[in-house]
């Protein structure tokens, strides 16, 4: 039985962000008979009065939803925890030339740790979020919990949740796991939620949408250097390696390189292929399918497994090296150390990026994953 169908009558605290997904989730939980309490998390205070931070409006939306649904809501400030556990690691990774995924760490450290602890202190037995994912008891062991992809694969967020452990999953419900985004919007309209047509949030977890380079410039030292091609030819200057990611093609400032121009005067599309920290050099290639952008395998560390142990299944797996990527057929090769793995792909994968997460699946079941350290062409 799917655990979303049991436990009625229990007190459940849901993270209400002011968005439509968490709002519909709260309504669904109340319909299922839970005693629902809303919790609005404020996790960012720097430049909170800027056009890019909408926490005040989000709070007003969340409070309006709680009033309409008929549930209590509380605001809690986790800004200190966010800066210490998430944002500091985010900056450290960028400074080292990697491209981190703050949403993964944010879920593990804030939404399912600080938030969970606070909810338990309120007397809750369970927590819920508006993520598109599912959790169930394992068919072969009802004492173990599994994290599954959402029914709506176009919105599935299990990639961001792969670091959740058994204790966290046992106390978590995902009301939207079995329905589609289209159904969520339709429900929001039918219920009459004030935020039914509100645009989905994007950008950095809890920080929002903003000009990324300008934002990072506030926290990281800018160290310009050369942009070289795979032939070693200089084609420009970069603004600092932290501001670029593997596979990036916009904002490079490369144009009019004569030796690469075609007869009609047009030029190639350039892609970031490599960052060399020792020489502060950014390497670019003029071809989407250049060998430097294709990985046959990768190495990952800082592993986290949903079951709490290394997977039993090593073959016939699917791997994601970025959100929204189609699962790439792969096999898992045990690393020389417990906290390291090698993932070999059946077909080369494009723009595998150190700092991002490699998440493994066996069918719809999310096994866990690790942080990409390197890859092989």
Image (cartoon, rainbow, N blue to C red):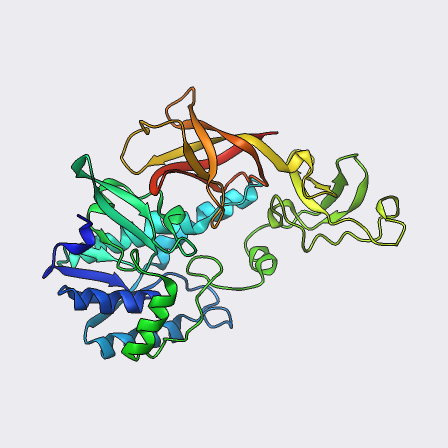
Which corner quadrant of the image does residue 338 belong to? top left
Is residue 85 at all visible to an observer of this figure? Answer: no
Picture coordinates of residue 6, whole percent (x, y): 13, 54
Picture coordinates of residue 109, whole percent (x, y): 33, 48
67 sits left or right of 303 in the view: left
Q: Which residue sits at x=35%, y=51%?
A: 107
Q: Is residue 176 above or below residue 328?
A: below
Quadrant where the C terminus is found in the figure: top right
In the displayed image of the protein, which residue is found farthest to the left? 9
Is residue 356 at all visible to an observer of this figure? Answer: yes
Picture coordinates of residue 102, whole percent (x, y): 44, 50
Picture coordinates of residue 296, whole percent (x, y): 56, 30
| Viewer-closest of 139 and 174 | 139
Q: Which residue sits at x=23%, y=52%?
A: 172
Q: Which residue sits at x=43%, y=71%?
A: 54
Q: Which residue sits at x=17%, y=48%?
A: 1
């Amino acid at each position: 039985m799917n655990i979303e169908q049991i436990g009625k009558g229990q007190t459940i605290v849901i993270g209400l962000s002011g968005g439509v997904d968490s709002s519909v989730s709260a309504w669904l939980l109340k319909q299922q008979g839970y005693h629902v309490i809303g919790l609005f998390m404020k996790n960012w205070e720097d430049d909170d009065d800027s056009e890019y931070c909408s926490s005040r409006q989000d709070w007003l939306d969340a409070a309006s939803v709680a009033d309409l649904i008929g549930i209590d809501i509380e605001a809690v400030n986790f800004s200190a925890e966010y800066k210490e556990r998430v944002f500091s690691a985010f900056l450290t990774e960028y400074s080292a030339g990697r491209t981190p995924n703050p949403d993964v760490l944010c879920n593990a450290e804030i939404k399912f740790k600080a938030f969970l602890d606070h909810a338990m202190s309120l007397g809750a037995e369970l927590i819920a979020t508006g993520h598109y994912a599912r959790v169930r008891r394992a068919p072969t062991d009802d004492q173990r919990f599994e994290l599954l992809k959402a029914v709506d694969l176009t919105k599935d967020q299990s990639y961001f949740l792969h670091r959740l452990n058994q204790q966290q999953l046992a106390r978590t419900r995902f009301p939207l796991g079995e329905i589609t985004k289209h159904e969520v919007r339709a429900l929001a309209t039918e219920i009459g939620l004030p935020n039914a047509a509100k645009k989905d949030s994007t950008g950095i977890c809890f920080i929002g949408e903003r000009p990324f380079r300008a934002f990072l410039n506030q926290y990281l030292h800018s160290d310009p250097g050369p942009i070289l091609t795979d032939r070693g030819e200089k084609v420009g200057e970069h603004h600092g390696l932290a501001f670029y990611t593997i596979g990036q093609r916009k904002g490079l400032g490369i144009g009019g390189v004569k030796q690469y121009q075609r007869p009609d005067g047009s030029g190639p599309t350039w892609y970031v292929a490599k960052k060399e920290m020792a020489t502060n050099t950014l390497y670019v290639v003029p071809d989407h399918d250049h060998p430097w952008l294709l990985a046959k395998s990768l190495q990952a560390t800082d592993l986290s497994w949903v079951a709490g142990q290394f997977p039993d299944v090593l073959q016939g797996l699917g791997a994601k090296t970025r959100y929204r990527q189609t699962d790439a057929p792969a096999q898992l090769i045990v690393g020389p150390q417990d906290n390291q793995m090698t993932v070999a792909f059946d077909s080369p994968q494009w723009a595998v990026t150190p700092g991002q997460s490699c998440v493994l699946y066996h069918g719809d079941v999310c096994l866990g994953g690790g942080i990409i350290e390197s890859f092989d062409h």
